[in-house]
Image: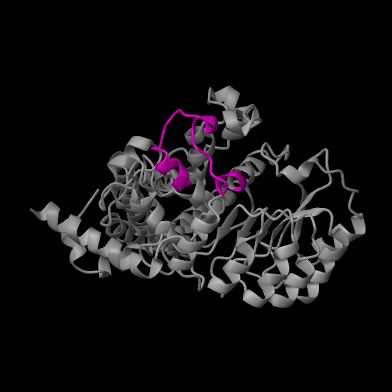
Amino acid sequence: MHYPLLEVTGWPIFIGRFHPVIVHLPIGFLLILALLEITQRFSKIRVSQDMLRYILLWSAISSTLACVAGYLLASGGGYQETLLSNHQWQGIAVAAFSWIAWIVGSDQFRKKIQSGRVFYFATLGIAVALTLAAGHQGGSLTHGEGYLTKHTPEPFRSITGMQPSPEQADNGHRITDIQQAVVYTDIVKPILERRCTQCHNASKQKGDLRMDQIAMLVKGGESGPALITGNSAQSKMILRCMLPENDDKHMPPKGKPQLTQDEILLLSWWIDQGAPAEKRVADLKISGQIEPALATIVSNANSAAPERAMKPSLFSKEIPKANVKDIEALRAAGLIVNNLSNDQHFLEVSAVNSPGFDDGECTLLTPLSEQVTWLKLAGTNITDTALNHIAALKNLSKLHLEHTAITDRGLAQLKNLTHLEYLNLTHTKITDTGLKTIASMKSLKSIYVWQSAVTDSAVAQLTRQYPKLSIVNGVNVSGLAQSIKKTDQLEATAKKH
């Protein structure tokens, strides 16, 4: 539902966004009122009629305010018409019956009408029932249709004739062979469902965009197609993910779970391959930089059985089992430690929940120099000093150092890591000098240098010099926002004509 006249000023939208806050007031007031009335009927507890009417008055006032704010929020559009209409009229009915209940519950009304007490309970009951119905519809508008019942457990699903839950449906589906995985169904669609479709689905279409179907991505929304097959560099679903998080056009919005760089890489790869709906991984061209990203996706999808379908070559090595005390020391420092395989002893260590991890704590990695092969220290407080300890991890194959304070001087210490295949240096101070230092490493397949001090000319030179090495320099983000804004303005002008 769309209200063009309300878009002249930002005030309607500003007020409308308080709807999720205000709407909880009538819910709370009406439910507590109903409980008090029931309690009085079946126990010795008594509450004064004046207090009950006071609660009911505020139920009516707050539900009316919620209706006004909801109407203004709807002016921004992006919601499924039928669902929005049902929610809107249910909300209006809640306000109406709350006011009716307040009127008929008065002493004056009861004195004039003999069955006033019965009328009061009937209107109050209807208001409560409508509140629950409107709340369900509101949840569907915000989170997608069927949000409330999506995870209904057994035996209630069978009794009511509901379809198996998403968890049950997924139990029989694991990626056992990455080469046979259907790219869209097994890789792309799950990413979009985790990060995008909450706001872009059949029930809720922010910016008139749906992302739950390939055809809808191509169709796009208010800003045009979200996906341009064969061209991820011009596809807005990728471009907007790469904008600074505080940019108004960045997606997902700030505060929402963000796409990881592996997820962005895989989406871009799928688009560049023509955004196929049914092709398998084996049918597409796989570059060196895609392999570790696929391995990460597989490990996440098969969390209950974490064998990696795509393993680095070093996994054929036999190494001793890690000392439990050494692993516990890392966990005590806030790091996540997982086995990469049930039949081997290689470890993945991540500081995703420990941004305060620093150089001093890097000494905890030393006793596990043989076992740690995937290390994620993105966004931590490490400096070049830490790389001295990281360089001792002789079986390290994947290293995340993005958003850290490392420099060229520290990076040079990694040259002796003979198994390092993947290195992420985005948002660091690494320059052309540092990149040239490590580009000659024979094992290295992928380096990410987005938003670093590395220049495009150095990337071009090293790509020619080392053709088997993938150096990902991303998009010039500084000019991206202006480019998207200009495109949007041109599209808006074209629509007017």
Q: Is residue 64 magenta?
A: no
Instruction: Examine the image and state in which quarter residue 392 appears.
Output: bottom right
Instruction: Examine the image and state in which quarter residue 434 appears.
Output: bottom right
Give the magenta part as a residue range. 267-292
Q: Looking at the image, is 431 positioned above or below residue 29?
A: below
Of 136 and 426, nearer the camera is 426
Q: Count all numbered tags in the image, as a single digit.
A: 0
Of 125 and 436, nearer the camera is 436
Residue 251: % across, % down: 42, 58
Residue 471: % across, % down: 52, 58
Q: Looking at the image, is 83 positioned above or below residue 478?
A: above
Q: Looking at the image, is 42 positioned above or below residue 429?
A: above
Residue 279: % across, % down: 47, 29
Which residue ends up furthest to the front in the rendered image?
465
Q: Is residue 270 magenta?
A: yes
Residue 274 showing in the rendered view:
yes
Q: Is residue 132 left or right of residue 331?
A: left
Q: Is residue 343 left or right of residue 236?
A: right
Residue at position x 70%, y 44% from top? 312
Residue at position x 76%, y 66% from top? 390
Residue 403 showing in the rendered view:
no
